[in-house]
Image (tube, helix red, strand yellow):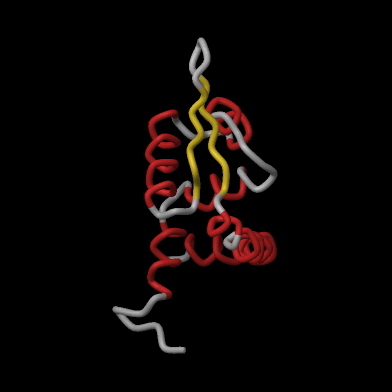
Amino acid sequence: MDYLADCRARIAFDVLAHTWSGVVLWALRHGPQRPVSLRKRIGGISAKALNETLRRLEHSGLVARQAYREAPPRVEYHLTELGATLIGPIGALGEWAHRHGDEVTVAREEP
């Protein structure tokens, strides 16, 4: 497969290129989460960044939002079937990063 400017692989690269997308998808792999729970699970993500990421993933059909009519209102997010198909590739990227992260860090520090 050639990775050209107009190839379909760019869709996946675009989704995973956003800083928090892969992390949020990975955090949702075990089931629905409320935004507060997601922030605690992920750590280091602002409410604004999480909200923007969830909206972008929802727009791409990877995450679904479920609003409950309760007092106070409750919202949960979960992976769609399509979103769940990315868990394997994200896991593989995580394994690669675990094995090679130090090498990348060293290379970035070199002039």
**Residue at the location (42% across, 43% down)?**
53
Task: Please identify the residue farthest to the top as the structure is shown.
Answer: 71
**Residue at the location (49% across, 19% down)?**
69
**Residue at the location (30% across, 79% down)?**
6
Image coordinates for residue 1, horizontal then vertical, percent: 46, 89
Image coordinates for residue 37, horizontal then vertical, percent: 60, 28
Task: Please identify the residue farthest to the front as the structure is shown.
Answer: 69
Drawn side of residue 60 relative to residue 101, left or right: left
Image coordinates for residue 63, horizontal then vertical, percent: 50, 47
- Figure quadrant of the C terminus: bottom left
Residue in front for this viewpoint, 44 or 8: 8
Task: Please identify the residue farthest to the left as the structure is shown.
Answer: 5
Drawn side of residue 40 relative to residue 65, left or right: right
Residue in front for this viewpoint, 31 or 92: 31
Image coordinates for residue 44, horizontal then vertical, percent: 52, 34
Q: Is residue 4 above or below residue 84?
A: below
Drawn side of residue 106 relative to residue 54, left or right: right
Q: Is residue 11 above or below residue 1?
A: above
Q: Is residue 68 above or below residue 5?
A: above
Q: Is residue 104 above or below residue 1?
A: above
Total numbered badges shown on the rendered structure: 0
**Residue at the location (48% across, 60% down)?**
109
